[in-house]
Image (tube, rainbow, N blue to C red):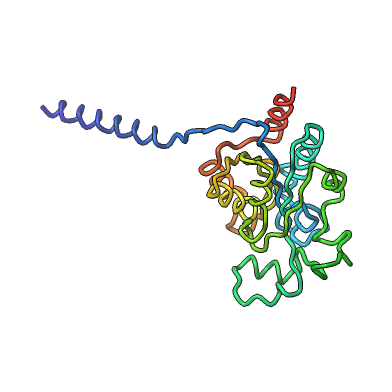
């Protein structure tokens, strides 16, 4: 009798374990490149991606380990070669933005260090080569006819700019998302686009994040990319997908 009870308990434990494991395996909805697909790149700017940028001390390790700079260039390049639209969502702060009275921790830090600062909303004095400017190697692509630059987002997500409008007006349903910073602007763009009905795939090595004592922004973002997006690609994988679609 005792052995029968033990066997039933063991069987129940195995069944429970199998059930938990089945829920633990996330489905992969998948992502197919088609005529309604575009690439969205957040913050391809000096303050994030240049060793001279104001955040390099905390993001440089992640950027280097992921080969983020070259991977983003690979996305710009394959888009230009295959006539894929690219939407760049930049981050700018003007003088009036420094008067905000409500700020989160990293917002306050960005203002304190002059991140993404621009002198004026209507002219570009001092913009060339500044922390708000594009990384130099991307400029030849960003100036291309397939690239649309949206109005700037102000905190992390695109709720404050015209990205969703520009995507809809161009007939885009499927978004390949990359850029900086993984757990902040990139993740916030992913969340808002998903909530807006877009299918979103994230390129995990074409982004990076700050690593602070006890805080690993990149690992936090990877978890949410996997849970929220339709698919997570490497740069090599998505470049291959785009090339194969256009064969």
Q: Is residue 17 left or right of residue 146?
A: left
In depth, the one of 233 and 3 nearer the eye is 233
What is the number of callouts on the image? 0
Q: Is residue 233 left or right of residue 133?
A: left
Q: Residue 77, relative to residue 42: is it above or below?
A: above
| Residue 62 image point, x, y percent | 70, 48
| Residue 94 image point, x, y percent | 76, 70
Q: Residue at x 80, y 56 (%)?
A: 46
Q: Residue at x 67, y 47 (%)?
A: 169
Looking at the rendered image, the quarter that the C terminus falls into is: top right
Q: Residue 128, relative to residue 30: is it above or below?
A: below
Q: Residue furthest left?
A: 1
Looking at the rendered image, the quarter that the N terminus falls into is: top left
Q: Residue furthest top?
A: 247
| Residue 88 image point, x, y percent | 74, 50
Q: Residue at x 13, y 29 (%)?
A: 2
Q: Residue at x 67, y 58 (%)?
A: 161
In depth, the one of 24 and 214 nearer the eye is 24
Instruction: Tell me where residue 69 sits by quadrant.
Output: top right
| Residue 83 image point, x, y percent | 78, 35
Q: Residue 156, relative to residue 199: is it above or below?
A: below
In depth, the one of 149 and 68 nearer the eye is 149
């Amino acid at each position: 009798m005792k052995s029968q009870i033990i066997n039933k308990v063991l069987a129940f434990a195995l069944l429970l374990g199998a059930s938990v494991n089945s829920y633990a395996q996330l489905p992969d909805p998948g992502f197919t490149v088609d005529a309604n697909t575009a690439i969205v790149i957040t913050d391809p700017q000096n303050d994030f991606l240049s060793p001279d940028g104001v955040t390099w001390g905390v993001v440089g390790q992640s950027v280097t380990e992921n080969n983020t700079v070259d991977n983003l260039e690979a996305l710009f390049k394959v888009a230009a070669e295959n006539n894929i639209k690219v939407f760049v969502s930049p981050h700018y702060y003007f003088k009036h933005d420094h008067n905000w009275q409500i700020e989160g921790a990293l917002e306050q830090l960005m203002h304190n260090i002059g991140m993404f600062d621009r002198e004026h909303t209507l002219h570009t004095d001092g913009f060339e080569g500044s922390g708000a400017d594009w990384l130099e190697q991307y400029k030849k692509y960003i100036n291309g006819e397939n690239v649309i630059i949206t109005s700037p987002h102000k905190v992390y997500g695109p709720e404050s700019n015209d990205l969703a409008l520009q995507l809809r007006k161009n007939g885009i349903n499927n978004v390949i998302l990359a850029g900086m910073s993984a757990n902040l602007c990139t993740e916030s763009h992913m969340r808002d686009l998903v909530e807006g009905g877009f299918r979103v795939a994230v390129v995990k090595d074409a982004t990076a994040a700050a690593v602070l004592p006890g805080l690993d922004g990149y690992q936090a973002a990877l978890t949410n990319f996997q849970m929220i997006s339709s698919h997570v690609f490497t740069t090599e994988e998505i470049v291959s997908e785009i090339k194969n679609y256009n064969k």
